[in-house]
Image: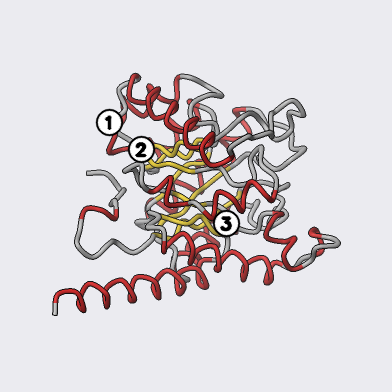
Amino acid sequence: MSDVDPAAQTSVPQRTQIMGVLNVTPDSFSDGGRWFKHAEAVAHGIDMLEQGADLIDVGGESTRPGSARVSEEVELERVLPVIRELARDGARISIDTMRVSVARAALEAGASIINDVSAGQAESGMLGLAAQTDADLVLMHWRGLLSDAAAPVHYDDTVGEVADELRERVDAAGAAGVARDRLILDPGLGFSKNAEHNWEILSRLDVFADQGLPLLVAASRKRFLASLVSPEDPAAASLEDRDAATASVSVLAAQAGAWAVRVHEPRASRIAVEAIHAVRQAAVRAAGD
């Protein structure tokens, strides 16, 4: 059975899930390699679960602007020990990777979701792997690596174009044999998008939720949120302020019926989505009276 539980399947929508971000990298834009050592990464993963995360997204390669890709060997060395140990503790795990080999090894180590920011475009075999393994697959909107200056950031109709390009990836996944009920959509906030594009997408999350697939919203600590609290110098925004802004986005995502939000600090977002869920439960009860 899929880890995904679409909100539309019950009269009371399912609570939006909390995906905790675990960067096993030395150069993440958001946490600066704080969890680079394996023991510290595992401890942080467990702490995020205790703080309200429902699943942990483990990544061993930074996708921040200006980052350089690491080798397959380095990526495997970073993520596999962490995944194995967290899986032994019963954690639900997604692997954040664009490499088929890393995704395959992560699934064998205990992950159950492939979170590919390229939606199978970096390595076409990713779609086939998802089909072969019945893993859930996150398809994120992507127009190239953030380190690629040629990656297009122009949109005539931001929401419409992002939605259309995601539909193309859904069709490609289906053609590769991936069951539709295994797919999750991510509009790719911050990827080949400026702040205005990101806010437009957040204002129309219903367009993505209405595609009938689970929706993942990943805004946590990104520059466009930092600009709210430190417009002159977004890089100077504290993590606490970025997390407060992130929790606000988690409210928007939950209201739109998102399956999950991907966050670095689970507690505030867990409280936020629980509040939205309580309101929805009350509305259903009132409608039944």
Image label count: 3
Q: Is label 3 in contact with label 2 (beta carbons under 8 Å)?
A: no
- The residue tagged 3 is 39
- The residue tagged 1 is 179
- The residue tagged 2 is 183
Which of 287 and 26 lies nearest the eye of the viewer? 287
Q: Is residue 278 above or below residue 195?
A: below
Q: Is label 1 in contact with label 2 (beta carbons under 8 Å)?
A: yes
Residue type at mark 1 is Ala
Side of 210 relative to 193 (left or right): left
Q: Where is residue 254 drawn, in percent x and y?
A: 42, 62
- Residue farthest to the left? 289
Element at label 3: helix
Q: Where is residue 272 drawn, in percent x and y?
A: 46, 72
How would you rate the neighbour count of disc 1 (Cα within 10 Å): few for under 14, some for 14-19, many for 20 or more?
some
- Residue at 75% of width from left, 60% of height from top? 227
Q: Is residue 30 above or below residue 180?
A: below
Residue type at mark 3 is Ala
* The quarter of the displayed image where residue 167 is located: top left
Lower position in the chain sequence, tag 3 or tag 2 = 3
Q: CA distance from mark 1 to mark 2?
A: 7 Å
